[in-house]
């Protein structure tokens, strides 16, 4: 499985914050991604949310430390780090962690958000490799507000179905509240420049996690939705100490050790002690 990215794909990621790489994943790797997804469903980690049984399933699992050996091994044997390096023109690529989304029956969308308000990341070289494990239209898949990876940091959402923009940090942070992008786009399709792609297994959508992005829902037109995310970081990736320290969110503010014996501080290159270069 080798893949050469085009200048247009590099430009799309740099300027739009998202790009589709069609048909990159070969059948053997696709089988592994599906098997890894199943493993993760069977082994929920400390910050998994949702349910895995019943007619309506909504399950999100993120960065399970126990899953690290499995995903690290998969990534090591995959072309994904090299693809990230080419897309960015980066000499370093590290693997951060996995995330999976499983929805079945009647479920809601993954509300619009930016990952960077949940995690201490800054800089141009962060990306989510988003793998569809079933066929989806653009609206059912993942979409971003074009170019929003270069824009402001909004507050997060608490993913409350009754209030999709309920602030994660509120008064504890200094972030503007998320706009209700779904409602505004429904009222006026030109209000937001939203970009996404029809996708099928084998494709990869690469996006910058600071992009405003959402994920589709399931209903009678898509009874089951499965996708897996692998996160990478490159030359221009920094530790950013921008999150309020009240213990909420995915990041627990535990100091992150470096190989030199210290800890990451604001603005440092994002190089935790475990981060090895996968393209060196
Ligand atoms: O696929 C989804 O529902 C959401 C994906 C997402 O939020 C992400 O890749 O960070």
Image (tube, rainbow, N blue to C red):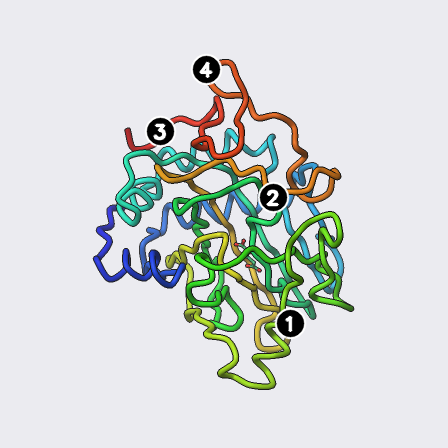
| Residue 188 position by quadrant | bottom right
In the image, residue 162 lies at what x, y percent? 78, 68
Relative to 188, residue 51 above or below: above
Nearest to the eye among marks 4 and 2: give it: 4
Q: CA distance from mark 3 to mark 2?
A: 22 Å
Name the N-terminal-most of marks 3 and 1: 1
Give the residue number, with chain letter if any, for mark 2: 62
**Closest to the observer, 155 or 108:** 155
Q: Are marks 4 and 2 in contact (CB under 8 Å)?
A: no
The residue at the point 55 percent across, 58 percent down is: 226
Q: Along the horizontal axis of the image, is 79 left or right of 32?
A: left
Q: Along the horizontal axis of the image, is 171 left or right of 267?
A: right
Give the residue number, with chain letter if any, for mark 4: 260
Question: Does the closest atom of ligand 1 sit within 8 Å of the Cβ of label 4?
Answer: no
Nearest to the eye among marks 2 and 1: give it: 1
Q: Residues within 10 Å of mark 3 (few under 14, many from 20)?
A: some
Question: Does the closest atom of ligand 1 sit within 8 Å of the Cβ of label 3?
Answer: no
Name the N-terminal-most of marks 2 and 1: 2
In the image, residue 73 lies at what x, y percent? 43, 31
Q: CA distance from mark 3 to mark 4?
A: 16 Å
Give the residue number, with chain letter if any, for mark 3: 277
Q: Along the horizontal axis of the image, is 279 left or right of 266?
A: left
Name the N-terminal-most of marks 4 and 1: 1
In the image, residue 6 lies at what x, y percent? 22, 57
Q: Are marks 2 and 1 in contact (CB under 8 Å)?
A: no
Name the N-terminal-most of marks 4 and 2: 2
Label disc, if present, on residue 180 of the rendered structure: 1
């Amino acid at each position: 499985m080798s893949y050469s990215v085009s200048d247009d794909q590099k430009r799309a990621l740099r300027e739009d914050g998202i790009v589709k790489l069609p048909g990159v994943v070969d059948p053997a790797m696709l089988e592994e991604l599906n098997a890894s997804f199943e493993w993760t469903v069977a082994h929920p980690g400390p910050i998994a949310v949702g349910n895995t049984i019943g007619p309506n399933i909504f399950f999100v699992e993120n960065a399970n430390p126990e899953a690290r050996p499995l995903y690290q091994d998969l990534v090591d044997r995959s072309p994904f780090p090299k693809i990230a390096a080419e897309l960015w023109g980066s000499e370093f690529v590290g693997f951060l962690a996995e995330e999976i989304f499983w929805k079945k029956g009647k479920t809601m969308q993954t509300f619009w958000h930016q990952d960077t308000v949940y995690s201490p990341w800054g800089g141009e070289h962060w990306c989510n490799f988003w793998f569809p494990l079933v066929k989806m239209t653009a609206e059912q898949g993942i979409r971003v507000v074009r170019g929003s990876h270069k824009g402001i940091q909004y507050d997060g959402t608490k993913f409350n179905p009754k209030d999709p923009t309920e602030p994660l940090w509120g008064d504890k942070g200094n972030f503007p509240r998320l706009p209700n992008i779904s409602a505004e786009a429904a009222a006026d399709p030109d209000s937001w420049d939203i970009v996404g792609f029809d996708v099928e297994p084998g494709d990869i959508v690469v996006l910058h996690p600071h992009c405003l992005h959402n994920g589709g829902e399931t209903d009678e037109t898509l009874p089951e939705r499965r996708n897996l995310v692998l996160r990478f970081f490159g030359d221009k990736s920094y530790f950013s100490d921008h999150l309020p320290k009240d213990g909420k969110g995915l990041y627990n503010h535990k100091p992150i050790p470096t190989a030199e014996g210290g800890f990451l501080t604001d603005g440092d290159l994002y190089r935790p002690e475990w981060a090895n270069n996968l393209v060196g």
